Image: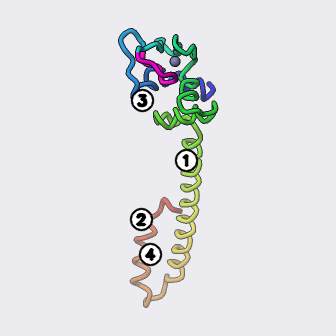
């Protein structure tokens, strides 16, 4: 599903209007934010079927509503809804996941390098009585960090 479709599936026209502090009455009408009026003439249709204003004859879906409310082009309106409702459908999420995977890989590499480094030091201490304390320390460290290997 395209992001715009997902946005439309996740957020209703009523949700959007209410997030702008516009109250929708029981009949599904609200005062149109796109033209000046006293009595509600913007009809909100249920089940994601959009909206239509009988006063200024504008209408559409949630995205076109935000486009007109905020004077935004289509992609920016999609993005605005995504961040306003924390949908996480755009950009940020997958790239964050990527960078987390990269971070893990980098950590893994550093761990392995440190493990190998200490393993070499351990080998160098073997058979040297004056390094016995260090040897013991390294022995413990190596067995504690076996999963870094
Ligand atoms: Zn209107």
Identify the secondary structure beneath mark 2: helix
Q: Determine which of the numbered discs, if any, sits on residue 138 in the image.
A: 4
In this view, the residue farthest toward the left is 26
Mark 3 nearby-residue class (10 Å; few <14, some 14–19, many ≥20): few
Percent of width and height locating residue 71: 58, 32
3 or 1: tag closer to the N-terminus: 3
Mark 2 nearby-residue class (10 Å; few <14, some 14–19, many ≥20): few
Give the mark count: 4
Separation of residues labelled 4 and 3 (CA atoms):
59 Å
4 or 3: tag closer to the N-terminus: 3
Separation of residues labelled 1 and 2 (CA atoms):
31 Å
Q: Which residue is mark 3?
A: 19
2 or 3: tag closer to the N-terminus: 3
Q: Nearer the viewer, mark 2 or mark 3?
A: 3
Q: Which residues are magenta?
A: 30-38
- x 44%, y 75%: residue: 138
Q: Which residue is mark 2?
A: 144
């Amino acid at each position: 599903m395209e992001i715009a479709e997902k946005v439309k599936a996740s957020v209703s026209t009523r949700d959007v209007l209410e997030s702008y502090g516009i109250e929708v009455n029981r009949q599904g009408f609200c005062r149109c934010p796109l033209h000046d009026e006293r009595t509600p003439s913007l009809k909100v249709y249920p089940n994601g079927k959009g909206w239509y204003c009988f006063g200024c004859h504008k209408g559409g879906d949630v995205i076109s509503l935000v486009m007109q409310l905020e004077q935004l082009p289509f992609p920016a309106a999609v993005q605005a809804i995504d961040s306003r409702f924390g949908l996480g459908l755009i950009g940020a999420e997958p790239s964050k996941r990527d960078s987390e995977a990269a971070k893990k890989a980098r950590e893994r590499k550093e761990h392995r390098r440190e493990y190998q480094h200490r393993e070499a030091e351990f080998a160098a201490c073997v058979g040297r009585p004056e390094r016995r304390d260090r040897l013991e320390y390294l022995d413990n460290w190596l067995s504690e960090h076996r999963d870094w290997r």
